[in-house]
Image (cartoon, rainbow, N blue to C red):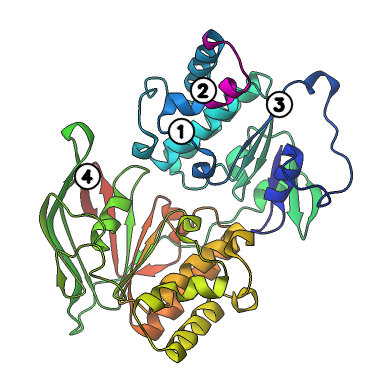
Amino acid sequence: MCVTGPSGCGKTTLALAIQGLLKRGEVSGKIVFAEMDRKRPVGLVFQDPETQILCSTVEDEVAFGPQNLHLPGSEVRERVKGALGSVGLTGYEKRSVEEMSAGEKRRLAIASVLSLGPALILFDEPSAQLDTPGREKLVEMLETLKSRSHALIIADHEINLYGSLADRFYSMDGGRIVDLDRESALASMKPLGDDSCDSRPPSKGTESFCVEIRGLSIAGGAGTPLLSGIDMEVRQGESAVIFGRNGSGKTTLLKCVAGLITPDSGSVRIAGVCNPGVGDLVGKVGMLLENPSRQLFEESVRKEAAFSLTRMRLPEEEVHIRVREALDLCGLAHLEDRSPLTLSYGEQHRLAMASVMASRPEILLLDDPFAGLDFPRRERLLKILEEFCTRHRSSMIVTSHDPGSWRGCRVDRRWILDQGKMTCG
């Protein structure tokens, strides 16, 4: 079955309740499982797979659950082999988890759950962060699990992916759940806008380039180039989108722009700084990571938004003004005293955005910012970005694996990154 609904409606909470992960006193009512499945565990694949990956290698991660059940070594090995085969990761046993793409980590998280032999598997936004081929593989994998008598509950914004898979559809809003007929459920999915991504001709103004990259190359594993001969330029105030599949090198390229990675060859000039290193672009460049929760660590929303400003040694009054502007822009002012860890995924996403915007950077880098967001929140995010860039004349470079997310949006520059090379899109 599939459950859809806007961000923050309670889909994740429902999955946690079924899994039994809510604290006593936070839930009332009953959750009843079939008698025959009581001895078989319920598995949960979280929205962000990195939050449930504990070990350093693929083999150790999948073996972790069965080992904690004190199963014999031979059975553990059989379970690891079967789980990896089910998700298409056979041969990855010794691979470092840190070297895996977002899609591979998603499959690894599923394999670690499968190794426990669950009768029921819960999936929280499994299509988030996956490109089109990755989503197709995901659906094939889920169909295989269903054919092997696993019951599946899938919470996702884009339920049209599961039209041929799901037997039932439900919608949640405000903590309540209602039944949907198949036709209504699939018809409710509408893309952002009506037109394709529209690339405007590059600006002819007098603004100089704030991003100039020439011949950038970075070697990948086994000597295979991850990025090869990348040329890229963006003027102040322009917006640019880089499209590419999972693992194509989009995040690596953004980290080069942010000064977090030094390329093996080529020249990089960002905001007037040549070949920047870590710390050289504080206040000039702001970057939103693909998993926003990974860059949240302060004890309150207000302190989180102020973190970069304190590093810039700005006066207290100026810090207050900028924090207030960023939180207002992202719709978080009423949550300023909350702990970031208590926020919903969508709220954490906006908080990470506010913390990046507070420094009013010349260049805003966004790594796949639409992942895990429903369509209304994608539109809201676009409006926030447009208003911010217009107000502060900031440039914006965004990566995306989903061109459909940008339908109807106007951008100044558009590239496609594939097999280490970048071409105009």
Question: For this view, does 376 lie left or right of residue 362?
Answer: right
Q: In this view, does 164 lie above or below 176?
A: above
Is mark 1 in CB contact (under 8 Å) with mark 2? no
Q: How many labels does the image show?
A: 4
First along the sequence among labels 1 and 2: 1
Q: Marks 1 and 4, Cα distance to the nearest angstrom?
A: 29 Å
Number of the label disc, if any, that sits on residue 41: 3
| Amino acid type, callout 4 | Gly
- Camera sees residue 425: no
3D distance between C-alphas at marks 3 and 1: 21 Å
Q: Which of 111 and 339 is in front in this view?
A: 339
The residue labelled by disc 1 is 55
Query: Between tags 4 and 2, which lies in front?
Result: 2
Identity, as a three-letter code, of the amino acid under mark 2: Ala
Instruction: Find disc 4 in the rendering and name its residue.
Output: 420
Q: Quadrant of the N terminus?
A: top right
